[in-house]
Image (tube, helix red, strand yellow):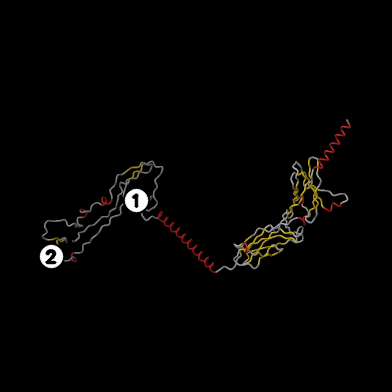
Amino acid sequence: MVAAFFAFLVLWCLHSSAAGAELLPPHNVTVISLNTNYTLRWDWDQFINATFTVEYVGRYRLTSKKGPKWYKACEKTSHRSCDLTPLNLYYFSIYMLRVRVNVNENHSDWVLKQFCPDEDADVGPPSKVDLIPAGSDLDVYIIDPMTSTNVSMKDKDYIPDLYYQIIYWERTADTQAVTTLTLTSKANIVTLPRLKAWTWYCVSVQSRYDFYSKSSQFTSPHCMSTEGPVPWWKIFLYFVCSLVICFLLVLFLLLIFFRCFRTIKATFFPSSQLPGHFKEYFCDSPGSDIPRLLSPGSEAELLCDRVSICPEPVFLEIHDPPLEAQPAPPSGLEADSSGRHSRQGSSGSRDSGVYSTEGGSGLRQPSSAQSCTEAEDSWQVPVKLEQVKMQDMAACLVADEGVVDMCV
């Protein structure tokens, strides 16, 4: 029984060692870094459920007599990468990184990778580039590349010798005929000299570090037009346009004011006025212009007559000259005692159409009420308002007329 147990134990150990030998370590271990953002990447081709462990230590600790103490960066992760940025690795130190595969209780061999941020980390382009016209020149404002903690890469703890290479060119439709100019500077504000006035230029900036021959990518081109003295024809054109705009604006405001004035005047001061006897009836008082409103709560009935308003007739007034001033009657006519002239020997008597003013109102013209208007059929509208009768109101006011004899 004991022999069988030892045989099983030996077979299990051999199987475990064989499985461990078959577990291949990761390969193509690299560090992808930009400024202070670091990521360790690797490849592993076997398609089984496995995890990975990443550790790191400073290289100077490898020579310690007690042996180095490795620190966990990523433990049992299923990804083929490990982010080292949260570790805040010192930029000028050298670190040893190692990674292995874990399958159940089996492990692969460690794969080592040396990493120095100052030497191996790439430098990024400027965070931002702005262009501002400065007369016929352009000012380039450059913001430094930033670390993961939002600190400038030109800080003394990173790359104090960082500088910028600026290329600029005149923007034209023919891209093959573009001539680029280069300017290097460590300053964050750079003025591009010898530019043409009122011309478009494009600028692109690159970060550089010569100690390890580091250079970033160029930023995307930023284009801006230069300025210069304004031509006289532009000044004249601006002046004329401003005058035209002001004139149109004032004309528009005057037109609006005139229309509003006419509307208000026609509303509150109409040209057509009601006759006096209408005003006395409709207004609250004889001298008031405020109409009297009918009470909405009145239970009375409104009786209306249809009327027509006519203009007041104008009569011709003829005055008789005195008898002394009258000319002598022609032959065949003789004057009577009243000053009239009659033809002698006329057969019969005809109406001459001339009437005397004597006799007062005995001889009057036809009634002006009949010539102006006649009351039409009246109607009644039963509403809950005050009863109003228009029958006693005259349709037209006619002044007393005077007719005198006229000589024919």
Sequence-first tag of 2 and 1: 1
Q: Where's residue 347, x and y in %?
A: 11, 57
Residues 384 and 21: in front is: 21
Identify whether 36 is placed above or below 23.
below
For residue 198, side relative to residue 51 (left or right): left
Residues 79 and 155: in front is: 79
In front: mark 2 or mark 1?
2
Residue sticking out furthest to the top: 1
The numbered mark at residue 143 is none
SS for tag 2? Answer: loop
Q: Quadrant of the C terminus?
A: bottom left
Q: Which quadrant would residue 122 be assigned to in this image?
A: bottom right
For residue 56, side relative to residue 316 (left or right): right
For residue 8, side relative to residue 375 (left or right): right
The residue type indicated by label 2 comes to Ser
Q: Quadrant of the N terminus?
A: top right
Residues 113 and 164: in front is: 113
* Mark 2 neighbour density, 10 Å: few (under 14) some (14–19) many (20 or more): few
SS for tag 1? Answer: helix
Q: Residue under label 1, please give it.
A: 278
Identify whether 115 is placed above or below 167.
above
For residue 299, side relative to residue 345 (left or right): right
The numbered mark at residue 331 is 2
* Mark 1 neighbour density, 10 Å: few (under 14) some (14–19) many (20 or more): few
